Image (tube, coloured by chain):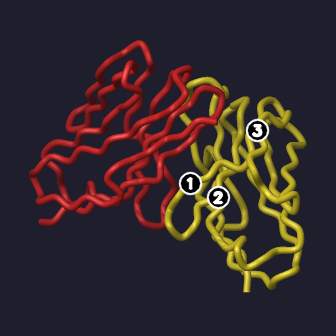
Chain colours: A yellow, B red
Amino acid sequence: DTAVSQTPKYLVTQMGNDKSIKCEQNLGHDTMYWYKQDSKKFLKIMFSYNNKELIINETVPNRFSPKSPDKAHLNLHINSLELGDSAVYFCASSPSDRGSEAFFGQGTRLTVV
Amino acid sequence: GENVEQHPSTLSVQEGDSAVIKCTYSDSASNYFPWYKQELGKRPQLIIDIRSNVGEKKDQRIAVTLNKTAKHFSLHITETQPEDSAVYFCAVTNYKLVFGAGTILRVKS
């Protein structure tokens, strides 16, 4: 009964491919996020959804497209993968987008070769 | 947008000593200030948080202080232990959760 789960945990793929990462939370939270953690450990927010609606879209290439079929799921699709996309991607959820704890998934380590 | 600066980037202390990590932020409307700990290969996890109407909060060996006027807050860890070694992130939220760059804490035994 993992609270925030993402799949896959590891993803190795070639440049130019398209891939998806799935995220699900069973906490009943309204807000979900995607973060990118690069090799220097910096956690950069990419997207934020509140009740299935996109709230924040940081400066992210439009090759990255989030999709939220319902408020328990936030998937990330990446087109035309580049070497610089290699990173750990974390999904997170919180009760609201105003001042509450975020719970993170276990992360997906994406390696583009 | 919100800008969060965190210092130092690395911190080495001897077991039993105290460790202090500081963060400053830019958006005066920010109202929630959590601290996360990330062990190697693991996910970030909340260790303590503070809201804008409180100046200090303590939980056993961990404390956080907030100065809203100066827009800075700090994490204090006393009696450090080797298992405290990790990356620590401060964060700030108004309508989105923005993280500082992280501090690598090494506790030497």
All told, the count of numbered labels is 3
Tag 1: amino acid: Leu
| Residues behind callouts 1 and 3 on a single chain | yes
Taking depth in this image into account, of B92 and A12 the one nearest to the observer is B92
Chain of the residue under the numbered disc 1 shown in the image: A
Whether pointer 2 and pointer 1 mark residues with C-beta atoms closer than 8 Å, the reply is yes
- Indicate the position of residue B34 as horizontal and vertical percent values: 45, 34
Whether pointer 1 and pointer 3 mark residues with C-beta atoms closer than 8 Å, the reply is no
Figure quadrant of residue B70 = top left
The CA distance from mark 2 to mark 1 is 6 Å
Using a 10 Å C-alpha cutoff, classify the residue at mark 2 as few (fewer than 14 neighbours), some (14 to 19) or many (20 or more).
Answer: many
Q: Which residue is mark 1?
A: A43
Tag 2: amino acid: Lys
- Indicate the position of residue A98 as horizontal and vertical percent values: 62, 24
Q: Which residue is mark 3?
A: A56
Q: Residue at x 47, y 53 (%)?
A: B101
Q: Which residue is mark 2?
A: A36
Mark earlier in primary sequence (2, 1): 2
